[in-house]
Amino acid sequence: MKDIILALDFDGTLYPIIQYDSEQMLALSSIENGNDEKEIRTFIDMDKRGCLLPHEFNSQLESHVKGQESAIVEKVVDRILTYFDPSELDPLRDILENENVHMALLSCGTDILIESFLRRTGLLKHREHMLAKEMTVKDGRLDHFIYHVTHIRDKAEKIKELRTLYDDPIVVAVGDGPTDEPMLEEADYPFIIDWRGKIKDPKFPRLFNFFELKIFLKNSFLIK
């Protein structure tokens, strides 16, 4: 069977965002350790309203979480896992059991949050490729970002790079919103996942769950 690159976003794609995404939750969690609550909530409000450019968001997030104990990451993932039933990812795990499917996690988010989530949901062993901001840890505390991704276009460029690693692969991409559009436009089969049925007039074919993706791939003879 042909190689399939399965490109997945993280926040809003592998789990539904109920109130805060993973990085917003990371900033919020720092309040418990002494950070100024008003300042953190203002930062999150500005992010939600789209008032921050990527470099502004990243620099402010780094300043808010720098020096926090790395254990804060697990607390964030604990909360994410209350947003949904992790068994809803079972069809995705079934897809990834196919040897011709190569998982690429392409996100503008933070790597240690993503890796913790993947580990906790049994998906980490399937991750073959990843693009995300790297959060360094020094003496058990969060330190600073290394920017492997700075713009949403970087995810599309990563797909172009991944295509060269396989023999005429098929790219299937799943995202959840406007920041995923360049990645989705680069895919052969792009999908928007709408966990709660609230996305109006999606620009790409809509999935409500990963079971629908599994059925599509089976019916298209792309997986067994």
Image (cartoon, helix red, strand yellow):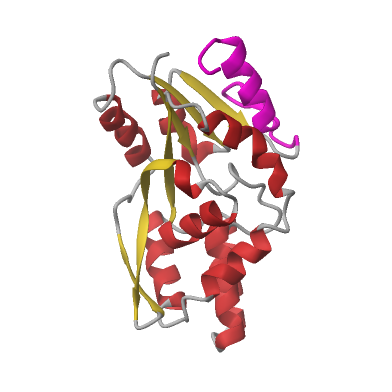
- Residue at 35 percent of width and 33 percent of height: 156
Q: Residue furthest bottom?
A: 34
Q: Is residue 207 magenta?
A: yes
> Would residue 65 be found to the left or right of residue 194 on screen?
left
Magenta region, residue range: 197-224
- Residue at 30 percent of width and 34 percent of height: 157
The residue lying toward the viewer, choosing from 40 and 13, is 13
Placement of 138 over or under 48, stated as above or below: below
In the rendered image, residue 119, in percent from the top left (x then y), is placed at 52, 55
- Residue at 44 percent of width and 46 percent of height: 107
In the rendered image, residue 169, in percent from the top left (x then y), is placed at 35, 19
Residue 94 in sight from this viewpoint: yes
> Would residue 199 be found to the left or right of residue 8 on screen?
right
Give the quadrant of residue 170: top left
Give the quadrant of residue 45: bottom right
Residue 42 in sight from this viewpoint: no
Quarter the N terminus occupies: top left
Placement of 42 over or under 190, stated as above or below: below
- Residue at 26 percent of width and 31 percent of height: 161
Quarter the C terminus occupies: top right
In the rendered image, residue 212, in percent from the top left (x then y), is placed at 67, 24
The residue lying toward the viewer, choosing from 165 and 52, is 165
